[in-house]
Amino acid sequence: MMRGARQLAVAALGCSLSVAQALCAEAAEQPSVEGSGASSRAVSDPELVEFANAEYPPEARAAGLDADVVLAISIDKDGKVTNVEVLEPAGHGFDEAAVAAAKKFVWKPAHRGDRPVAAKIAYKYHFHAEAEAPPPPPAAPLLEGSVHLADGKSPLAGAQVRILAGTALVLELTTDASGHFRTEALAPGDYRVQISADGFETYTAEEHVAAGEETNVSYGVVPKNDGEGETVLVKGARPSREVTRRTLSRHELSRVAGTSGDALRAIQNLPGVARPPALSGQLVVRGNADQTTPVFVEGLWFPTIYHFGGLSSVVPTEMLDEINFYPGNFSVKYGRALAGVVDAHVRETRGDGRYHGLAQVDLIDARGMLEGPIPGLKGWNFIGGVRRSHVDAWLVPLLRTKDTQITAAPVYYDYQLVADTHPTKTSYLRVGILGYDDHFRAVNEAGANSGTIDTMNASFGIGAIYHDTLSPDTSVDVTMSFGRSKQRFVFSDIRAQTEANGTLGRGEITQRITRRATLRTGFDLLFAPYNAKGAIPDDSGAGAPDIGSGVTTPLRVFDHSSNFLEPALYSEMSLEPNARTHVVSGVRLDFTSDTRRVDVAPRTTARYDLVPGAKKTTLKAGSGLFYQAPGLLDIVLSDDAKKLRSRRAWQNSLGVEQRFTDHLTFSVEGFFNLLDQQIERGVNEQGVLAYNNFGTGRIYGAEFMLRYSEDEHFFGWLSYTLSRSERTYQPGQPSQLFYLDQPHILTILGSYVLGKGWELGGRFRFVSGNLYTPCVGYGPGSPPALYSSTQSGYLCLNGPQNSKRLPPFHELDVRVDKRWVFGNFTLGVYADVINVYNRVNPDFIAYNFDYTRSRPQTGSLPIVPSIGIRGEF
Amino acid sequence: MEGSRLPTLLCATACALSACQPDFPPPSEVHGVRVLAVHQDPASGVPGGSVKLEMLVADERAATTAADGTTLEPPPVQIRWLAGCNNPPSRQYYACAPALRALAEDPNIATSGLVGEGSQFALTLPADILSTAPELPSDPLHYGVSYVFFAACGGAISTDGRDGFPFGCNDPSGAPVGPSDFVIGFTTIYTYEGAENQNTNPALDGVDFDGVSALPALAFDSSSATPPPKTCTADADCADVAFSHRAVCSEKNTCAPLVSACSGKKCPSYPVYPHVESASFQTFTGENEIMWASFYTTLGSFEDDTRLLDDRVNGPTRDSGTGWRAPAPNGERRTSTIWVTVNDQRGGVTWASFDVVVE
């Protein structure tokens, strides 16, 4: 008797034996697009009626060898096996044994409608030396979804849904009258899903399905020669390595009102993300500080994500496929982050053999993109873009008419060039260049802020990513990049300049160990020689009294050259003990050369389907440690960086997700984060200000999200975050609210396709007002400020830190899109009206020269119509 | 670091660029009691050396009318000094609070040489002001710091103190005066190591009013040995003063140019232009020392409150002056006092002042 011969679903090629449903229809008839009748033409799956055990090769058994043999089994319309081919041999006699056994299988044939049809399936025969008997069949993965027109107007019936493992066709389905398709015939693994229909562009997506889980997808396709090309991919409720992953599709990213279609600004509408201070361009997640939620583009760390205070993202929306946002408790794959992670992905080229282009102009910038095959390089395609702001063209003349001292305007540009190919049937290679440059220079000779103002932020990187599905159970991902970045900041006598050459490498191997256990192991390495020099005022630290501009204080001068060397190793095990449970536990080790310390970060997340099925209810929880090494400023201004340790956060979360329909979901998640080892300023034993790790804090709250994911007409969500963020900066000091604490953050947004090329969207936000510290003097009868004759100005005498709050922020934005199609050319126009009812939102308190008078002041935009025009082919 | 100053500076830059300044009365318009400058001589200290301080105070409080109809002039401004905070922890002024509290409670404080009254005050720096100062790798040079606190009170100075500051200011009824009549502050005396780092106060070659130098006939220059402007009791006493405008006798009994009051947007702007001696443009730690001029007036208004004179990057600026506009007419001849102070970044300061009669 065969010991332990049992069947497993094939990840990359195959089918699940237990249900034996994956099939590759061989029927000559191709489905056609024919409306409601299409549902009767759907293909049913063949079912394994009788299984035959293979004889375990004696030598292999003696050697204790396991093996997988991947077979292609042809089944005729009577359910008989007509042919068996070995697709992936294992040797040692396994191949012959598997073929012999498979020929004895008996099947119930596949059906197209009521008619039986022949089919060809991929099948993995698994030999396991130790198992005594075949285990119970695994729960089948469920892949279901819908196909619709990209403009969301209507579902697409009768579209071919071809599911491939590598290049091998595994399954072919046809969408029903409502554009839906569904199968439980797939084995767990990675697939390429290809959508095609007469008159429409072929669309391809990569999907992963897992045993006992449901993967919901929605694909939008565009008519041929439409030129829109914005195929939409909305990921469904795929179990993730994190407690919470929020994914925004490109269409959603480009249609959120008030963002001018900017992808990364759209993130600010998700739960847990605070409204950043005006003109700051910060990303504030769950009450944490800026620069604690890194942004990765294709796995590469982008130190700056916005041009000039949030004007726009440094990578245009058109280059992105989707953005995954993890507000906390993320995988050990990511490190050097205390709060959350934003992971953006550049889209794959279309690879349709034709050239496509785009040109867009709005009030802020102009951009162009070109995409198509690379001449002379078979199989290679490229996509490239360039963008430049033109604010200087109209703002400078405007400033001159206003008799202002500043008569210069910021300038930015960015560029991207990406080429990709499939070197083999199972691999994918992409190389690219990404860069941006922001600069502004002016001399202000009047007023309190007089002096030279000079800012520059430029970065350039070359990178490559490689993915290969080595076998149904094994895949590798490798990312390498080299980049140069330079930042300069000059404000009167305060200046700082950094230059760095960064090399970042990442590698991850995913190995499925058993049907219910997957191990991921990886490394990443940051090596960056840098130089930082400048002179900045002595930083008294958060919560310290006002010390003025620093112009009259001898500045802290630094000229520091060193290397950031931060290697990291991580490993995590993904366990699915049953169809309802998914647990991911891992650990990450980060070494930081500056502190010469290793940070050990264990993390665990778990999801449990309390109620499975289409309206499933999922409980989720996570806990883990997160570290962020001292930053550049901490290092260069520290007299002994080796005394510093990484900031640390212990993140905990617990939540519930409820799916009501394919599109409507609700989630609530509570979080409680403890911070310690925070790097703050305090007086050291020498009697001078120095960095230490005495800062602590706690952040807690809850996030709610009611979301309607995109269908052919609508997408939108309501998100609300209730939170509190507290800090204690030095021992003995009272706990105080963090300056970015925003207890209430409410966002309601949506976008509706009206038809005939029209789309209407809106966004309403209500956010607690910003905190501020009043100037109260030394007590009753004291002036509120102290005159510094050296600075010839006044210094605020602070009251309790962050003890006052400004009135709340609220704003309504409306966006209208209109699109015309002229053959191969599409023309689009949009108007994004920010702050429709012209609310004057107070952002900070402005004071007169001696702080005896104050007034809330806005830094936000008044009603502004942002108008853009775009042409594509 | 959370709450780092750098993002704040970036925001301040953005704010400056966005011209988001609210519509408050500018600092150049002087009302009530104002401290405009504190002159140090020498401009930087030496260990064990003496430093003389002189405060420039403007007192523009209005007279009040008593119940019996008599005019009550405001009481003279009282000034109190308190020294003795040397190289405090963190080197910041706010760390002086414990030292100030201890000094205020010291029964021998009056004879310690650390307190003083009046617009001038002299103190002796500790001999170890440098040797007890921390030396940090990130400091551009070794320096000690000494803070001298002061109060300028348009009432009666009290020593009942406030939390963290030893002086209060009360009106005759014993109630605290308002913030427009009471200024508290400090001046910083830096002691630098190395002769090449010693600072000197800026000096003025002249101050132009409407294109003609007001020195020496009409203006006072704190950095010059020239006599103060000519005094007078009547307009005729100023007949011999040569100036672009007719000189008349001001309410302060100095000869001053006469200009017309004006209202509306088409009023002339009279250039006010400080000429700084070229020797005042120094370098500090190898770079141009930042220098700026501040403008103050009791009537009328300035186009700019501050003008940059020496930029760290670009050196002396081309245009260091601004424009003064006369106040609106009210049927009376009035006198506006104009001050121009010139500061450098190490605490050096000089000033000039002159009157303008508006009719």
Image: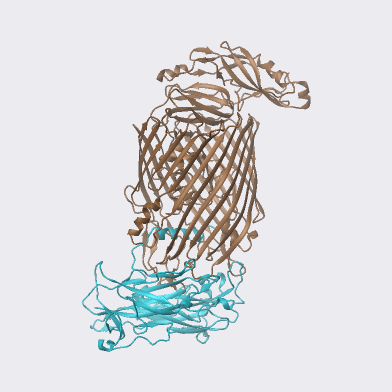
Chain colours: A brown, B cyan
Q: Residue furthest left?
A: B331
| Count of marks placed on residues | 0
A600 is higher (above) or lower (below) than B111 = above
Residue A63, horizontal then vertical, whole percent = 78, 27
A44 is higher (above) or lower (below) than B145 = above
- Does residue B3 show up? no
Which quadrant is home to the C terminus of chain A? top left
Residue B334, horizontal then vertical, whole percent = 26, 79
B227 is higher (above) or lower (below) than A840 = below
- Does residue A872 show up? yes
A253 is higher (above) or lower (below) than B318 = above
Which quadrant is home to the N terminus of chain A? top right
Residue in the image at 51% along x and 81% along y: B42
Quadrant in the rendering for residue A827: top left
Near-viewer residue (A659 or A871): A871
Give left or right: position of A765 versus B286: left
Give left or right: position of A315 versus A212: left
Give left or right: position of B68 versus A254: left
Q: Residue furthest top?
A: A78
Give left or right: position of A121 versus B79: right
Residue in the image at 35% along x and 59% along y: A400
Q: Residue furthest front?
A: A376
Near-viewer residue (A739 or A368): A368
Near-viewer residue (B35 or A254): A254
Residue A176, horizontal then vertical, whole percent = 44, 21
Quadrant in the rendering for residue B180: bottom left
Residue A90, horizontal then vertical, whole percent = 70, 24
